[in-house]
Image (cartoon, rainbow, N blue to C red):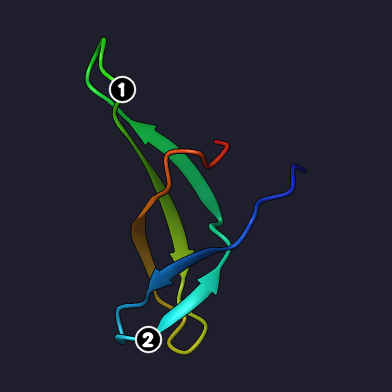
Amino acid sequence: MTYKKAVKVKTPGGKEMDLTPEKAWTLAPKGRKGVKIGLFKDPETGKYFRHKLPDDYAV
């Protein structure tokens, strides 16, 4: 398992937290750069949410 660094994200509850994505992937049209998306779990509610990751984040 590779080490994933924590990212500062805003949870659906409105708080800013440093969380580590459970899964990360790239959304890109064919031939384009695209964006990196991470799947996070809110520690308070247990619900999952997606958030954009920084461009330098290793996927």
Question: Does 20 sit left or right of 35 as displayed?
Answer: right
Name the kind of residue labelled 1 in the image.
Lys
Q: Quadrant of the C terminus?
A: top right
In the rendered image, the quadrant that contains the N terminus is top right
Q: Are marks 2 and 1 in contact (CB under 8 Å)?
A: no
What amino acid type is highlighted by mark number 2?
A: Lys
Characterize the local packing of mark 2: few (<14), some (14-19) or many (20 or more) Cα atoms within 10 angstroms: few
Does 58 sit above or below residue 9?
Answer: above
Q: Residue furthest right?
A: 1
The x and y percentages for residue 42 are 45, 78
- The residue positioned 47% from the left and 81% from the top of the image is 46
Residue 31 horizontal/vertical position (percent)? 26, 10
Q: Residue 25, image x and y in percent? A: 44, 37
Secondary structure type for disc 1: loop
| Residue that mark 2 sits on | 15
Most distant residue in the top direction: 31
First-in-chain label (2 vs 1): 2
Of 42 and 31, the residue lying toward us:
31
Seen at 37% across and 86% down, the residue is 15
Q: Is residue 22 left or right of residue 8?
A: right
Q: CA distance from mark 2 to mark 1?
A: 30 Å
The residue beneath circle 1 is 33
Residue at image coords 22%, 20%: 29
